[in-house]
Image (spheres, rainbow, N blue to C red):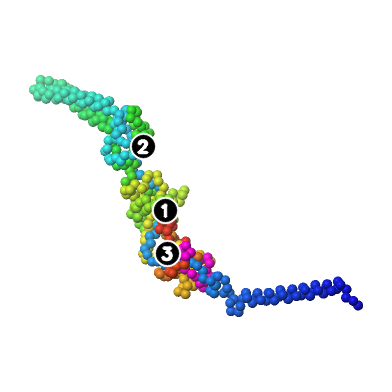
């Protein structure tokens, strides 16, 4: 029986499919052998001990003295501020200062028209002279009447009248003296002097205006800039530690830095801790005094106040980026002599200026990974590079910005 054409095609299709299946099985078999050879299971890939070296930035554990800081936002305040007022009413005749001038105690700054007050003083002096003349005459009369009374020429009532008149004129002289002193004081008040050492601000009134003692604005504001104060706040949970370090009696060092914590504006000392905690904000207010010889601190300026609580002697420190955190706590990658890494559990203290204090787990001089930890696992081979990615022959110096933001003591 002859073979039909469609049967030939069916046999041809079946044979071709079987051939393709054999080729696919052969390719899969070869791929499986290349993927994992005996004895290499679990060591392939960049993180394994048999993989390529991982580039990292290295550093060393240092040992040095580290100050422990508390930091708070502060405001610069003038050590003394005085609004200069007149103490008598009158016309402002002279202004003897320039705006922004440095002045001393007793410097003459302004003058009120003194003529009305001089006239009052002259009248008081004249009145005293008149009463003194009457008092002198009364004393002579009293002496004469005393002699006449002894001779019984006059009676007692005449003598008593002359005595009382003498006492009256004496009292009038004393009252005149008081009036002279009052008039002199008012005249002196026309000379307006500086009550403090400081710097004048913008003039608040011009020459020729009538000024009054009750005027709210005054003539000028004088601020004392040397020394100067910084008032800042700390959280109430820091208060006990501050008191334990003797902060209640003042004297602890305080540094003032700009808002970016990059520039030092002055070094001062703590002078007072406020006697209560602000219940609204949960903070305590402190004041520090600065010499401010270079006038870098200006009233009203916002600064970061850094209070030095204590100094940790011979503390072990590493860059803050060295410390990693995992399910089992904090750890660091330690570089071994064979250029492999191991995870080392560490106990950390405060972080200051980009550096973390290590309480236990590391030793001084030990080489650690500063950057590149996310590519590592225990046993990984590492290649030491600089922060720019260039290979290096030795460990990179320990990092940490000299002006990094400080944090308060405590466990991270």
Q: Which residue is mark 3?
A: 398
Q: Measure how far apart labels 2 and 3 are at the Cα level.
A: 51 Å
Q: Position of residue 171 (x, y in %)?
A: 21, 27
Are the residues tagged 1 and 3 within 8 Å (C-beta)? no
The residue nearer to you, when weighing 118 against 383, is 383
Q: Position of residue 187 (x, y in %)?
A: 26, 30
Q: Is residue 390 above or below residue 166?
A: below
Tag 1's secondary structure?
loop
The residue nearer to you, when weighing 299 against 7, is 7
Q: Earlier in the sequence, mark 2 or mark 3?
A: 2
Q: Position of residue 289 (x, y in %)?
A: 34, 49
Q: Earlier in the sequence, mark 1 or mark 3?
A: 1
Q: Which residue is mark 1?
A: 261
Tag 3's secondary structure?
loop
In the rendered structure, does residue 381 fall within the stretch colored magenta? yes
**Which residue lies most toward the left here?**
151
């Amino acid at each position: 029986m002859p073979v039909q054409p469609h049967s030939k095609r069916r046999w041809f299709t079946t044979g071709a499919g079987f051939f393709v299946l054999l080729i696919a099985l052969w390719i899969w078999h070869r791929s499986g052998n290349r993927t994992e050879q005996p004895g290499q299971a679990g060591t392939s890939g960049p993180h394994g001990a048999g993989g390529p070296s991982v580039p990292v930035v290295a550093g060393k554990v240092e040992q040095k003295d580290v100050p422990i800081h508390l930091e708070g936002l502060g405001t610069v305040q003038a050590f003394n501020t005085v609004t200069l007022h007149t103490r008598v009413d009158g016309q402002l005749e002279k202004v003897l200062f320039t705006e922004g001038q440095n002045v001393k105690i007793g410097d003459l700054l302004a003058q009120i028209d003194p003529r009305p007050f001089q006239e009052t003083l002259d009248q008081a002096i004249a009145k005293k002279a008149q009463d003194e003349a009457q008092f002198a005459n009364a004393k002579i009369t009293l002496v004469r009447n005393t002699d006449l009374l002894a001779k019984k020429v006059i009676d007692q009532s005449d003598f008593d009248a002359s005595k009382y008149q003498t006492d009256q004129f004496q009292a009038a002289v004393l009252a005149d003296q008081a009036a002279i002193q009052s008039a002199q004081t008012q005249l002196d008040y026309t000379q307006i002097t500086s009550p403090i050492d400081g710097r004048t601000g913008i003039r608040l009134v011009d020459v020729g205006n009538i000024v009054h003692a009750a005027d709210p604005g005054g003539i000028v504001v004088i601020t004392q800039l040397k020394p100067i104060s910084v008032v800042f706040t700390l959280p109430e949970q820091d208060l006990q530690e501050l008191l334990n370090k003797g902060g209640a009696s003042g004297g602890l060092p305080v540094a003032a830095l700009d808002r970016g914590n990059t520039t030092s504006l002055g070094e001062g000392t703590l002078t007072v801790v406020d006697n209560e905690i602000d219940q609204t904000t949960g903070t305590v207010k402190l004041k520090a005094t600065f010499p401010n010889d270079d006038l870098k601190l200006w009233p009203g300026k916002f600064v970061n106040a850094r209070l030095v609580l204590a100094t940790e002697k011979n503390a072990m420190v590493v860059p803050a980026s060295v410390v990693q955190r995992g399910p089992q706590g904090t750890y660091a990658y330690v570089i071994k002599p064979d250029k492999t890494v191991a995870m080392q559990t560490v106990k950390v203290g405060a972080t200051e200026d980009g550096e973390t204090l290590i309480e236990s787990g590391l030793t001084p001089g030990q080489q650690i990974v500063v950057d590149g930890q996310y590519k590592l696992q225990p046993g990984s081979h590492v290649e030491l590079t600089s922060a720019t990615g260039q290979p290096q022959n030795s460990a990179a110096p320990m990092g940490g910005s000299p002006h990094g933001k400080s944090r308060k003591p405590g466990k991270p």
